[in-house]
Image: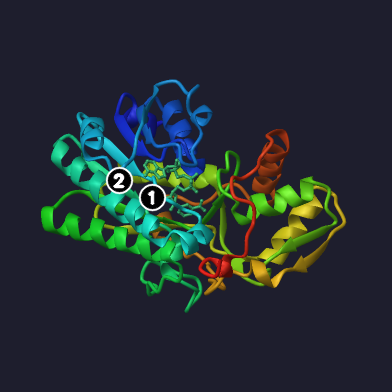
Amino acid sequence: MEIEKNLENERIVITGGAGFFGSEVASQLSILGAKVVVLDNFSSGKEHYVSNLPNVYIVHGDVRNKELVGKVMKDAGLVIHMAALPFVPDSYYYPQEFFSVNVDGTLNVLLESMKSKSVKKFIHISSSEVYGSAKTIPMNEEHPTLPHSTYAVSKLAADRAVFALHKEHSFPITIIRPFNTYGPRITEPYIIPEIAIQLLDGKSEIILGNVDSARDFTFVGDSARGIILSLLSEEVIGETINLGSNYSVKIKELVNLMAKILDKQITIKTDKSRFRPYDVENLVCDNTKAKQILNWEPKISLEEGLTITLEWISKNKISFKSPFKSWAAAFKS
Ligand SMILES: NC(=O)c1ccc[n+]([C@@H]2O[C@H](COP(=O)([O-])OP(=O)(O)OC[C@H]3O[C@@H](n4cnc5c(N)ncnc54)[C@H](O)[C@@H]3O)[C@@H](O)[C@H]2O)c1
């Protein structure tokens, strides 16, 4: 296969490579024979997600540490920048920390990549959250960017900085915008693990926030493959590319599908204190550009992906550092 030949022995740095999404990218690249360097501070990432992968070397550290990032970039051929504070509700509590990691951290990794002289391409992992709630459906890369949360604003600021530096210095970058991604090795209490934990705890009443909001979900193996395909394409330089499935499901439909997979009878109860302030109501990807340029489209259906994810969650005892507290109360206590 062409992709294997081209990435074999390539030195690829993945920031945030021990996280949920990054560890899948690291795993696929390891299989393809690349020499992978994972740079992670393990704030949410887990060492054991990547420590047993062949050809994967782990560096502990912060993407804001100039000296360390400079050393990591020495002789790097390709960079996939995924390190970020990614969990929207946390950004209600720590907006400045989100800007520090997601914007300053990105600039540091990009500038050190540029200085290295060896980096041939920088892939910046953005997020569909930068679009805000859908104005038109489906959402292609020209959709207005009207981010809601400070997480989304920080991701958009990073996108624009990466794009501006690309234009100013002709440095080869690509911005990838994954829509909601799910699968094994989750690290954050995203909606799918939140539902799964309640279902697997045997609860018959599932308590959630806004179950009428809708998202476009893609299995992590598919999203990671899209990122890897972007490493090899010349056509993607300077481009922004969505990765998503082209349809959205309401959270209540997701709960019912997951309950069906587990053969459980449940009812859904909404708790107003769980509603996200200034929530995004709907995200639906238009992945035409990824199809055309990367020859990419998702292969795993939502039902198949959820089955794999539920199996992984039930085998691994998943818990999260911060138990639920009302998002809206961030500045009231
Ligand atoms: N999960 C999704 O649905 C989704 C969708 C779109 C985009 N993304 C983006 O994908 C990337 C990975 O997200 P994820 O869901 O895997 O989250 P994650 O928390 O599992 O991964 C983030 C990784 O970055 C590391 N990290 C955080 N701050 C760091 C720092 N200062 N220095 C070094 N490492 C640091 C964490 O330890 C973790 O391993 C993020 O950029 C996120 O914005 C995720």
Position in image of residue 81 (x %, y %) = 34, 45
Where is mark 2, residue-wise? Answer: 233
In-image side of 143 versus 323 (left or right) = left
Position in image of residue 278 (x %, y %) = 52, 74
Measure the alpha-carbon separation of dots 2 and 1.
Answer: 7 Å
Q: Secondary structure at mark 1?
A: helix
- Identity of the residue drawn at 31% across and 63% down: 157
- Identity of the residue drawn at 54% across and 63% down: 246
Q: Amino acid at mark 1?
A: Leu
Seen in the picture, residue 264 relative to 62 is either above or below; the reply is: below
Position in image of residue 289 (x %, y %) = 39, 60
Q: Which mark is residue 236?
A: none
- Identity of the residue drawn at 49% across and 74% down: 134
Q: Are marks 2 and 1 in contact (CB under 8 Å)?
A: yes
Q: Quadrant of the N terminus?
A: top left
Q: Quadrant of the C terminus?
A: bottom right
Where is mark 1, residue-wise? Answer: 294
Q: Quadrant of residue 26?
A: top left
Q: Secondary structure at mark 2?
A: loop
Seen in the picture, residue 321 relative to 255 is either above or below; the reply is: above
Q: Residue furthest right?
A: 265
Closer to the camera in the image, 232 or 160: 160
Q: Amino acid at mark 2?
A: Ser
Residue 292 in view here: no
> Local crowd at mark 2 within 10 Å, few (<14), some, or many (≥20)?
few
In-image side of 97 versus 210 (left or right) = left
Q: Quadrant of residue 12?
A: top left
- Looking at the image, is mark 2 or mark 1 earlier in the sequence? 2
> Local crowd at mark 1 within 10 Å, few (<14), some, or many (≥20)?
many
